[in-house]
Amino acid sequence: MEFLDRTEEIGRLQKQLNSGQSSFIVIYGRRRLGKSTLIKHILADDDVYYMAELNEQTVQLSLLVNSIASVYPSFAGITFASWESLLTHFNAICHKGTTLVLDEFPYLVKSCKSLPSTLQKLLDTKKLNFNLIICGSSQRMMQNMVLSASEPLYGRLNERMVVGPISITYWKEAFNLSAIEAVEEYSVWGGVPRYWELRENNGSFMEAIENLVLDSNGILYDEPAALFFDEEGNKQLFASIMTAIGKGVNLYSSLANALGKKTTELSTPLKNLAEMAYIKKEIPFGEPEKSKKTLYSINDPFLGFYYRFIAPNKSLLAIGRRQRVKEIIAAQLNNHIGRIWELLCQRAVSGNRLFNHDWMIASRWWGKVINEEGEPELLEFDVVAESYDKRYLLVGECKWQKSDYSSRLLAHLKKRTELAPFAKGRKVVYALFLREKPLDTPEGNILYPDEIIELNK
């Protein structure tokens, strides 16, 4: 699969490495996002790249010596007793401006707790001849090492890069998909390059799901366990929280009850999962940050798919009932895609100019209202955003289903909006976000998958 996107990241890295001064660069992000590929893309022939594994310090030093010797033969056969002696010797013989990459840096720290302090000492001399890039998939560990004021490397870096998923726009173009196909595929593989690379070699959409995720020997069958393996914290509790959210348990108190925990026991793991971008807090539009209406949802399409369809059905898959799980997926997949469609529509509105107005961050709204019959009614709106000038409110409905009448959908949206407290006294711009063209002549503001995907670029 070709190297996609990352133009901005490449530009920032090249600018830093070509600055003429020794640079310390930190790169991190979840596994399989292409961090190593990104780094290799900007390295020159005389740069040194070392991928660490879980080994003892003496083995790590020996393997790094081998990597350096492939570029600087005089390093071959030398034994070093410490990181400081190795890096000091490398600094003495390397070409000015060369780059040393220590990939999966957390593995190195596990074998030598003092390594960050050693790097601090060398960086503080201001006499390094080489650029140093450290990279890792353990997001929390990498964050703490460079963002915590108590850590040795705090305040030393010249560039920090958090590598994230790639936009749906690039996947549509790379795989030559229709807009509808792109949304469907993205709802499972998200923006993770490795997932798409695997998907590319596995036939149709459903064949790829079956081979990669439903098969107990599939590469992604136990993917969350691999992701959590990289992270510090209670990995079993992380998985239990994700499983509960995948089943639709979204309230803080409900999660505690479902897991048999006190609410205080969930505060830190929920915060950690959010920092790693595996989950997110959702607050109804216009509500305060600490609203009691706060919900937790899974923030990644693949993990959302996994914890909705795979985790709850692992027992069925273990006894070979794959066909039954496929039937469950077939019956409910459209609902899952619909949720991803909502998120794509919210992102498409956020920070963009649409319908002659510039919009701030879009989100959902949900809550109880009193309807025309004087009875309480639960309402939910898929997309709500305020214009930057505070004068207008966009209220939108997202539909991932077969064609409907736009006049009916719009009338229903307007009627419900009249009951919503956030819309009282506001100038409202109504919008429909539809999978397919309506059955009648399009009425009002309508956006379709092609436009939504382009706005997500």
Image: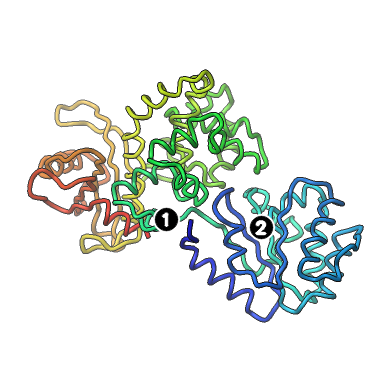
Residue 322 % position (x, y): 45, 24
- Answer few, some or many: residues within 10 Å of disc 2's Cα (few below 14, many 20 plus, some between 14 and 19): many
- Answer few, some or many: residues within 10 Å of disc 1's Cα (few below 14, many 20 plus, some between 14 and 19): some
Residue 197 % position (x, y): 49, 49
Direction top: furthest residue? 319
Which amino acid, mark 1? Ser
| 125 relative to 145, above or below | below
| Left or right: 143, with 251 as reference point | right
Q: Count the marks: how many? A: 2
For mark 2, give the secondary structure: strand
| Left or right: 394, with 239 as reference point | left
Of pointers 1 and 2, the one earlier in the residue sequence: 2
Q: Mark number for residue 167? A: 1
Residue found 52% across the figure and 46% down from its top: 277
Res. 260 image quadrant: top right
| Left or right: 435, with 268 as reference point | left
Residue found 11% across the figure and 41% down from its top: 405
Residue found 54% across the figure and 21% down from its top: 318
The residue that label 2 is drawn on is 135
Q: Nearer the viewer, residue 347 or 318?
A: 318
Residue 341 % position (x, y): 32, 45
- From mark 1 to mark 2, how far is it between C-alphas? 22 Å
| Left or right: 300, with 405 as reference point | right
Which amino acid, mark 2? Cys
Q: In the rendered view of the protein, which quadrant contains the C terminus? A: bottom left
Res. 48 image quadrant: bottom right
